[in-house]
Image: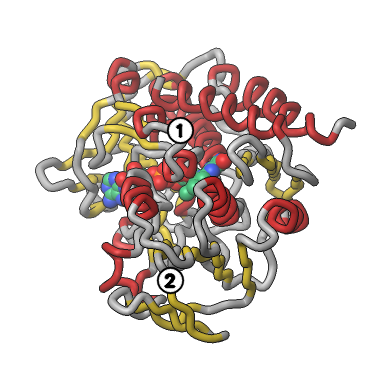
Amino acid sequence: MDRASRPLRLFRRTVLASALAAPLIRPSRAQGRVRVAVVGGGWGGLSAARHVRKAIDGAEVTLIEPNRAFFSCPLSIHYIVGERRAESLTFPFDGLIRDGVRHVAERAQMIDRTARVVVTQTQRVAYDFLVLSPGIEYMEEAIPGFAEAQGAIPVGFRAFEQHAVRRALEAHPGGDIVLSVPPVPYRCPIAPYERAALIAQWMDRRGMPGKVILLDLNPEIPIGGPTIQAAFAELYPTRLEHHQGVKIIRVDAQTKRIETNKGVLTYGTASLIPPMRAGSIVRTAGLGDRWAAVTFPNFLSAADDRIYVIGDAVGSTLPKSGHLAYEAGIHVADHIADRVAGRTGPDGDGLPSAICFAFFTLDEAMGVKIDARWNDLTRDIERRAEIDPRINRNAAQAAREWSEAIWAELVG
Ligand SMILES: Cc1cc2nc3c(=O)[nH]c(=O)nc-3n(C[C@H](O)[C@H](O)[C@H](O)COP(=O)(O)OP(=O)(O)OC[C@H]3O[C@@H](n4cnc5c(N)ncnc54)[C@H](O)[C@@H]3O)c2cc1C
């Protein structure tokens, strides 16, 4: 097989053939005045809200999300390095509202599981079924000095935070740019490496002195290591230093010093990614500690059979991927429709797939696809990964096509 054509094949097979939702929704739709609340208007929540409306005639769907628009993390590195406009990644919720989803533009403050009500600042949203997709939050306390430094060391791994990273890069005063990779599990395992590469290229193109120094707590790159290491060595042999097994002990934004287990370094600009955990609503609702505990294959909370948790907030060996969150939204919409229609039967073993792309130059990327199934005998997830062995232009094109297609599905 032409190695470079693999991501396009993945894209066609996965995105066009199956992931684009309509064909997955059963032709015989459920009916009923069921109330479904969805917390979180990102990849998982938007998908779930839309697909519940498609799968159940008359469903009252309420999306609780403080933002009034969606901002895509995939492709956001192009915005950070000044090669994309923010508008090309930002989409209002108009399509969703046209579909009949009610949007409450507030945070969910607490969930009363006994009364089946989500409480926001001004509303109480009653539900029969609740889907949570609150994404991740940063464990700032894991890096002493980080909380105090935050304004000066933006992270940019959640929607809209990318504006601050771009501003920091534009104001780069010279010297080295220090980035980091958090310990697994974290959002989009290849994304921190993409960021390091494109910022190295950004420095190259401007003829800037200095290096990108990538501090990686993981002893191994979590996925696609050989492809990533080859790209770093070929493209940025002197510009990018990747140090593995490095723990950040303290950061001081005043003196611009980072203390690590392997020594102290100073930086011109830094963007560090702390360890991650599920959005706080998972913990306050008693649905998990660091991550939400769910049962597979249906993403039902282990603590409450009226609540589904999808997306990056879930604790599992599935990768934290927007594509996977999107497919999980369809998955739970189907499951809710089955319950509303009184359809029973075995759950099957299918789990959503993950597709991730990472760029290593503005025009060359790698694609990763992970298929998964639930093994009911071993009570475990089986994964099968396809990874581009080399970065290539087809993968970059596939990434652009994939994102346009999936954004249209989420918010078109
Ligand atoms: C640089 C980068 C590149 C990436 N590339 C890819 C890629 O190529 N492919 C891919 O599949 N994935 C990629 N991802 C990962 C993808 O962005 C995430 O996996 C995806 O966003 C997870 O979706 P989610 O619904 O779990 O969370 P999110 O999309 O983060 O959505 C969570 C939403 O919940 C809201 N929320 C949180 N708490 C509350 C509350 N209490 N009340 C109301 N709302 C709340 C937040 O405001 C947010 O809008 C990338 C990520 C990054 C950072």
Residue at 62% over, 33% down: 345
Q: Calculate the distance from the C-alpha at mark 1 to the C-alpha at mark 2.
A: 51 Å
- Asked whether residue 142 appears in the rendered view, the answer is yes
Quick check: 182 above or below 404? below
Q: Amino acid at mark 1?
A: Ile
Label 1: element kind: helix
State the image coordinates of residue 199 (x, y, percent, origin top left).
52, 52
Residue at 66% over, 40% down: 365
Q: Amino acid at mark 2?
A: Tyr
Near-viewer residue (275 or 4): 4
State the image coordinates of residue 238 (x, y, percent, origin top left).
66, 63
State the image coordinates of residue 24 (x, y, percent, origin top left).
59, 22
Q: Nearer the viewer, mark 1 or mark 2?
A: 2
Asked if ligand 1 lies within 8 A of label 1, the reply is no
Which of the four quarters of the rendered structure image does ligand 1 lie in?
top left
How crowded pointer 1 is (Cα within 10 Å; few <14, some 14-19, many 20+) is rated as many
Near-viewer residue (315 or 56): 315
Q: Which residue is mark 2?
A: 267
Quick check: 3 above or below 224? above
Disc number at residue 336? 1
- Asked whether residue 295 appears in the rendered view, the answer is no
Label 2: element kind: loop
Near-viewer residue (125 or 103): 103
